[in-house]
Amino acid sequence: MPAPPTNSTRADRSPALSTKRPLGACVTYDLFTDPRKKLSRSEFLERFEQGLTGGVDFVLAHFGTSPALAEMMGRSHRIMPTTSRGGGLIDRYMRIHRCDNPLLEHLDGIIDICRRMEVVVDLGDIFRPGATADAGDEMKWAEIQLLARGPHADPERRRAGAV
């Protein structure tokens, strides 16, 4: 009986596995590389779309934070406040510019771009536990509630009239 094929053998025979095209993208890293630069709506959405031009199937975006959650994180007793590089970049951007999470702020434009380009949105989690003691804590549940209800879930956004 012949040996089962190795991954490299399967990849050589499978067009889906041997493509040079990336399957997904995390545009958060590119969008917030220079956190001191405040991006306008059009600039933000243009850069978001540029991150998808490689023909990706999905985009990971860190929607699960807001100024209220960032403040809550600062007061939390977590061992590791966040394990997400993208979430940390967005948190820094919000603090520098005293603004909302631009991914939530421009959600309508992001959805339009993703529909047009047939890209699936992956809701990257920011407050996943980095230590057993942090598992299932108030930060993770607050993020889940924000993601489940969307931008309207953040009372700070409602008070500011952003939604």
Image: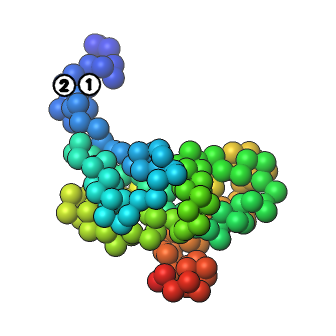
Q: Name the amino acid type tagged 2.
A: Arg
Residue 127 spot, x, y in % from top left: 63, 55
Position above or below: 40 against 1: below
Residue 24 spot, x, y in % from top left: 34, 45
Q: Residue at x 36, y 59 (%)?
A: 44
Q: Residue at x 26, y 25 (%)?
A: 10
Q: Is residue 144 visible?
A: no
Position above or below: 136 against 27: below
Tags 2 and 1 in contact by the CB under 8 Å rule?
yes
The crowd level at tag 1 (other Cα within 10 Å; few <14, some 14-19, many 20+) is few
Identify the residue under disc 2: 13
Position above or below: 22 against 26: above
Q: Is residue 121 visible?
A: yes
Q: Name the amino acid type tagged 1.
A: Arg
Q: Which mark is residue 10?
A: 1
Q: Which mark is residue 49?
A: none
